[in-house]
Image: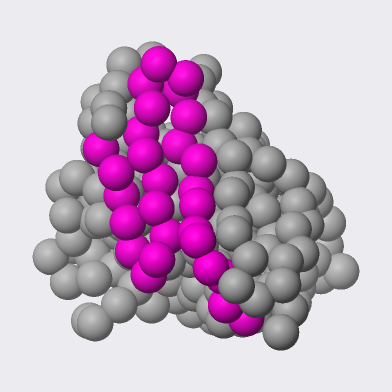
Amino acid sequence: GAGVSQSPSNKVTEKGKDVELRCDPISGHTALYWYRQSLGQGLEFLIYFQGNSAPDKSGLPSDRFSAERTGGSVSTLTIQRTQQEDSAVYLCASSFEGLGGYTFGSGTRLTVV
Amino acid sequence: GDSVTQMEGPVTLSEEAFLTINCTYTATGYPSLFWYVQYPGEGLQLLLKATKADDKGSNKGFEATYRKETTSFHLEKGSVQVSDSAVYFCVLSTQGGSEKLVFGKGTKLTVNP
């Protein structure tokens, strides 16, 4: 596609529920990144994919967070048993071979109530 | 680990004023440096970048020079406009491996007519 597409744009969920966030990167971009933007925390790296594999998961805050990527394209970030501190904007970015020139999606605003 | 420290805001200026947003970094190796901008209600956009020492990135009247000796990448613009009101992030890209981005906390700029 023309840009990085993320869905949903907004998600409100009850504490303890699971959520899935989707990212559709730019066609042909092999590298895909998830970041989280929280008030007072700035932007934090979560996970990096090169193709379908995730060589760097160092930013995932707990084992409630997981992500996968299929077909070298769409990625899903799953948060299990959501907590209020998970409330944030989750951003996805893609680039060609991780060479810079990252393009960000508009993000998913997650609110856990 | 790698980190970015940027001037805390908010910054409020009058139209046509001179802008400087300070940014310093700590990194192993030789990172690439970026300024990203987030306009109200929009996603993150790359403003400019520099990939090696003494490079100057420029775009839309903004400039920043990669200074290895002072580990700095200050953003400047000679005459700001109301439309420049946004949050500005200083960012580095780590070397090797994931090329993940490390963000500063962001500086909110408001330009008044």
Whether A47 is drawn above or below A16: the answer is above
Quadrant of the drawing holding the N terminus of chain A: bottom left
Quadrant position of residue A27 = bottom left
Apparent side of residue A53 relative to residue B42 in the rendered image (left or right): left
Q: Is residue B6 magenta?
A: no
Q: Position of residue B100 (x, y in %)?
A: 38, 39
Residue depicted at x 38% and y 77%: A5
Whether A36 is drawn above or below A23: the answer is above
Residue depicted at x 60% and y 72%: B16
Apparent side of residue B51 relative to residue A22 in the rendered image (left or right): left
Q: Position of residue B45 (x, y in %)?
A: 42, 66
Quadrant of the drawing holding the C terminus of chain A: bottom right
| Magenta residues, start to end | B55-82
Q: Is residue B71 magenta?
A: yes
Frontmost residue, A40 versus A109: A40
Quadrant position of residue B31 = top left
Q: Position of residue B99 (x, y in %)?
A: 31, 36
Frontmost residue, A56 versus B97: B97
